[in-house]
Image (tube, rainbow, N blue to C red):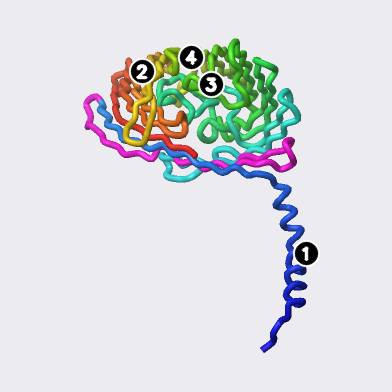
Amino acid sequence: MTIFGKKEVVFALLGGLIAAAPLLHAQANLGPITVGAGLQTSYSGENVTNGDFVNTFALNHARLYVSGPVYGDVIKFMFNTDYDSVTNKIGILDAVAQFSFSPHINIWAGRFLPPSDRANLYGPFYANEWLVYQDGIQDGYNFVFQGRDNGVMYWGDFGKMKVSVGGFDGGSATLNHDIIGAARIQYDFWDKEDGYYLNGTYYGDKNLLALGAAGQLQDGHAASTLDFLLEKKAFNGGAFSIESEYANYNGLGGYLPDSKKSQGAYALGSILLPKEVAFGKIKGKFEVMGKFAKAESHGQSTYVSQKTTEINLSYIIKQFNARVMTFFQDTRFNQKTIPNTWQAGIGLQIQM
């Protein structure tokens, strides 16, 4: 049996450190990596005209978020995944190379949310309502997965004005291989919204008056939206907000597969009550929200009108990181072949 002395042990440790130095140095250069996760799960009961009452426990979304710097603050990488409740599979939500030369000059390449309406740019986790994207209006733009498409984009912040423009893959989104051009411009009249992605509410953190316009174009077909958000701090710790949008999908996008043209608008209003209410060790504020939407779609030989009414009562524990939302939605169509429905339930959202 060989016995090592102190000198041999010291030399061995030094040799190991020298061998590992390149790896340690590479790891140090990576900088801080951010890892997060998000979950939405719910129970709902749905009643369909001339049909059965359906009870559903759903895993609506389960997301993993990873982001971090590659080269200082100039080059970054973002990679997010999301569980698709329809296919029961996990898909690539975002995979983006981000180049940030200044607030005015940002280049993104990969898969992400193209310039579009506010509703698409805040997604289900940052919406002010639970049953988002069911009104025939919000985020009717074509996409590959969860509002995303593959492409390249420029965006920039110019004080209170934000602009973005890019080109995106048409074949994967519309089966037409012509490039989809997309652009958006937004102006914040009061407080400024930083970054590219947006919120449906700020729960009283901002006094906001924002107006945005977006459009996409492919092979002579167009889609355009106008969106509006007003949010005002009020009641000494509460807030009220009004959100609205008008959408016109003219041969590009829309909700019905055979629609040649669809258009519509919605208005949403909410009040965040100022007083915190405790349940055991948990404290939160209640928010009441109401929404009405009307959409019209024209097909080759059909005309479909949809009216949607939604009411939410939410318990906001830690804004978008912890909230419980009860919901009721009534959806009515003019066509007898499309059944009217109403659904009610409760949803839980957790993020870290």
Kindly identify which residue carries mark 1: 18
Q: Which numbered marker is on residue 44?
A: none
Helix, strand or loop at mark 2: strand
Disc 1 or disc 2, which is closer to the eye? 1
Q: Are marks 2 and 3 in contact (CB under 8 Å)?
A: no
Residue lying at 54% horizontally and 38% vertically, measured from the top left: 93
Circle nearer the N terminus (4, 1)? 1
Measure how far apart labels 4 and 1 are at the Cα level: 58 Å
Residue type at mark 2 is Thr
**Residue located 26% across and 27% down the image:** 48
Q: Nearer the viewer, residue 245 or 188?
A: 188
Furthest toward the front, the residue is 6
**Looking at numbered disc 1 in the image, what kind of residue is underneath it?**
Ile
Residue 301 left/right relative to 172 = left
Label 2 belongs to which residue? 308
Classify the position of the N terminus by image quarter.
Answer: bottom right
Given residues 76 and 152, the one toward you in this image is 76
Q: Is residue 52 magenta?
A: yes
Answer with mark 2 or mark 4, whichever residue precedes in sequence.
4
What amino acid does circle 3 point to? Answer: Arg
Q: In the rendering, which numbered label is found on residue 233?
A: 4
| As drawn, 90 above or below 280 | below
Place of residue 344 in the rendered image (x, y in percent of width and height, measured from the top left): 29, 27
Where is residue 238, by image quadrant? top left
Mark 3 vs mark 4: give the one in front: 4
* x then y, percent, for residue 6: 73, 77
Residue 298 appears in the picture as rendered: no
